[in-house]
Amino acid sequence: MSLKGTLGKWTAAVVMATTVSIGVAEAREFTIASWGGEYQKGQRDIFFAPYAKSKGMKFLEDTYLGGWAQFQAMQETKNIPWDVVQVETAEMARGCEEGLFLQLDWSKIGPKANYVSGAASECGVGVVIVSVVIAYNDDLIGADKPKTLEDFFNVKKWPGKRGLRDDPKHKLEFALMADGVPVGDVYKVLSTPAGVDRAFVKLDEVKPFLQFWKAGAQAPEWLGSGDVVMSTAYNGRVSSAQKSGRNLKMIWDRNTVYLDSWVILKDSAHIETAYGYMKYYSDPKLQAEYSMNVLPYGPSVKDAVQHIPAKVTETLPAGKNVEGAFVTGSAEGIAFWIDNLDELTERWNAWKGQ
Amino acid sequence: MASLRHAQKTGQSVLAGKLARGERARKLTALSLIAPLFLLLVCVFGVPILAVLYYSVDNPLIGKVLPQTTAAMAEWDGRALPGDAAFDAFAADAKLAYKAKTIARAALRLNYEIAGFRSMTMKAARRIHRFKGASIKEELIALDKRWGDIVYWRAIKDASASYTPRYLLAAVDLELTWGQGIVQVEENRRIYLAYLMETFWISAVVVLLCVVIGYPIAYLIATSKPAKQRILFILILIPFWTSLLVRTAAWVVLLQNQGMVNDFLIWLGITDQPFEMIFNRFGVYVAMVHILLPFMVLPVYSVMKSISTDYMRAAASLGARPFSAFLSIYLPQTIPGLGAGCLLVFVISLGFYITPALVGGRSDQMIASLIAQFALGTANWGMAAALAVVVLVCVAAIYPIYHRFAGGDRMKLN
C-alpha cells in the first residue's frame, strides 16, 4: 500500500542509513515498522500500545517506505533493524522466497479459516485490505454519472483528463478488464505478448488524457480542483476528502484490491513476541474499530464485519464491494509481476514519453 | 685531517638532518591541519562516486550462488547447447541454493537477462531434488522445454561474469548480443537516451530562463541603496530557505485549474476557460526556475557589486550609447559570475525529479526519476548506478566545453 507513495521514498536513503546505525538486535526493544502518518498513528492507539501494555513491555516504531531497497540493505549489511513489518504482497512473496522473512507456524496465531482469502499465507498475516477505485467529483461531472470501469475509457461521454498511478503494475490488468477480459482471465491474456500489446493499445485510447499521480494524496486533490474528471485513487484517500467536504464519489466496479501483511524478520530476537503481536492484531473487534474510526480500509479477519454497521461496510473494501473485484495478491499475479516488472516498467516509461 | 673533514661532514649532515626533520614536522603539521577537510572530501565525494562506478559493473551474485555452473561453463563457446556436465552442475548448485534460500536472488538476477527466467529457474529449483532419471538434462528440458533453448544458457554465461557491461550498455539503450556484438535494444524499450536528452533540454531551458530573469534582478540589487538591497535580498533568500516540496506544492495551489491565478484571470474577464498552466512543461519550468533562481542571482550579484561604476561612465564619456557600453564593457565583466550561475543551475537541474513528478505531465519526467525507481523501488542497484554514471560522464564531458566558452578560469563561485 503506497500511503506515502513514491514521494516518501526519496528519504529512504537517509532512513536506511539511520536504521542501519541503530545497532545490535538483542539490545533493542520489539520494533514494529509500518507506513507512517495518520495510518500508523491509528495502529499505535488501537494495536501497538495496548499490546505492549498487556505484555508489560516497551516497543519501538519505524517507518517502511515501500519497495525493496530497505530489505536489500538488510540482506547486504546483515543488520536487521525491525522485528515485524507491514509489507505489500509482492515484497512478502519475495522476502519469503529469499529467506528474509520467517515461515510462520500458524498454530501460534490462529485458524487460517478466520481470515479473508489470501490473508493467511506462508510468511504473512493479513493486516488490511485497500482498494483502488475510480473516483469522480460529483459537482463537476454533469448529470450523467460514470458507473463502470469502461466509463473511465469513454472520453466522448466524459471528456477531460484522467488520473492514473504512474506504474505499469495492475494498470495493464485495468486496461484489459476495460477491454472486455473477464476478471478471472486477466493473467491468462496478459502472460502472452499479444495480451500486453492489447493492454497498451487500450491505454492508447486515453493516453492524451492521462495525468499520472505518484503520491496517494494527489488524486483527490486533482479531483477536487477539477484538474481531472476521473481518477483512480485509494479508497481511504477518497473517504478523507469526502470528510473534508469534497463531493467525491467512488465507483467500486471491478476495483483493484490490495492486501497488506505483517511479516516477521527471520533473524528477529523477539519471535515469540511477534507471534503474540500477530494474534493480537487479528482481533475482529479491534480491526472493526480501526476501519470505523481511523481509516476506512477493510479488515483482514472475516468476523470483523459483524462489528461494523452495514451502512459503513458499504463504503469499505469489504463485503459486497470486494466481490467481483480484481484481487492483486493471486499467485499468478505475483509471479507475473516479479518476472516482468523490469521489462514492463521500461516499456511503460517509453510508452509514456512518446 | 681526514677525521676533521669527516667530523665536519657529520656536523653538516646532522644539521641537514635537523633541518629536514624540522621541515618534515612543519609539513606534517600542515598536512594534519588540512587532513580533516581532505578526509571529508574523500568520504563525501570520492568514496560514493567510486562506489557508484563500481556498482555499475559489479556482478558477483551468479558466480557466488551457482559456482559449479559458472565453472562448468567457463570454457563453453555458446555455439551449441552445453553438455550434461553443465546441466549436472546447475542441478547441484540449484539444490544447495534452494536449501540456502539464495536461489531466489540468483533467479531474479537471471530475469534481468530474459524476462520470465526467474519463474523458470524457481520451478526447476523446486523440482530438481526429485529428479530420478539418468540424465538431468533430459528431465530439465521435459520440465520446461525452454531449458533446451540455447539463449537461456547464454544468459547464464553472461550473468556469471564477475563484472558486466550490461548495466552501462542498457543505460544508453544498447545490449550485448551473441553473434551481433553490441546492438540497440528493440524500439519500445529505448528510453534512457530519450529521458537523458529530455533532462538536458529541460535543464538548458531552465538555465536560459534563469539568466533572463536573474540577470536584471542581480543588477537591480547590485545598484540599489543598502536599505533597498537588504529588502531585495530577503525577497530572494526567503524562498531559498523554504523547503523545495513546500514551494513546489505552492505552485500547484496557484496554477491548478481552480487555482488562484486562474480564478483571478476569470474574475478579470480575461478568459472564461481556465488556462492549463500546470501538469505540463510550463509548470515544470515555472517551478524549477523559481527554485533555482537564487543560484543564478547570488553569483552574478557578487561579481556585479565589484564592478566599478567608473567604467560605464568612462564608456559614456567616450561616446558609447548605453546599450553598446553595456555589451562591450559591463557584460564581459559579469561573465565569470554568469558562468558560475549557469553551471550551478544546470548541474542542480539535472538531478531534479520531485518537482517534475509533482507539477509535470506525462512526458516531463527526468532521468533522476528513473534512477530513483531503480535504487529505491526494485532495488536494481546496478542499473541505478549505471544511469548515474551516464549522467556523471555527460556532465564531465560538458564541463571542458563550457570552460572554454565561459572562461571558467575566471569563473567566480563567490
Image (tube, rainbow, N blue to C red):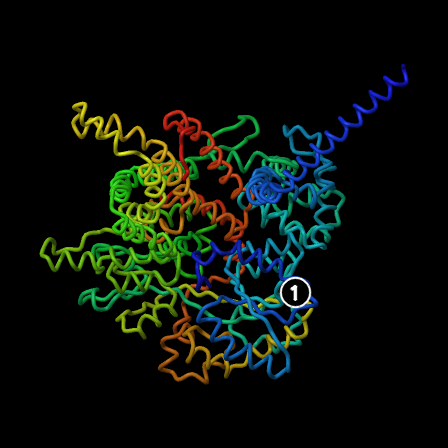
Q: Is B284 on the left or on the right of A117, as rendered?
A: left
Q: Say whether residue B113 is visible.
A: no
Crowd band around label 1 with a 10 angstrom C-alpha radius: few (<14), some (14–19), many (20+): some
* Image location of residue B105, percent across then percent down: 62, 50
* Image location of residue B262, percent across then percent down: 18, 57
Along the line of sight, the residue nearer the viewer: A316 or A86: A86
Residue B187 quadrant: top left
Q: Residue furthest left?
A: B269
* Image location of residue B225, percent across then percent down: 25, 47
Q: Which residue is mark 1?
A: A102
* Image location of residue B287, percent across then percent down: 31, 50
What type is the residue that disc 1 sits on? Leu
Which quadrant of the figure contains the C terminus of chain A?
Answer: top left
Does dot 1 land on a helix, a strand or a loop?
loop
Residue B33 quadrant: top right
Above or below for A80 versus B392: below
Along the line of sight, the residue nearer the viewer: B397 or B170: B397
Residue displayed at 35% across by 58% down: B246
What chain is tagged by disc 1?
A: A
Q: Say whether residue A230 is visible.
A: yes
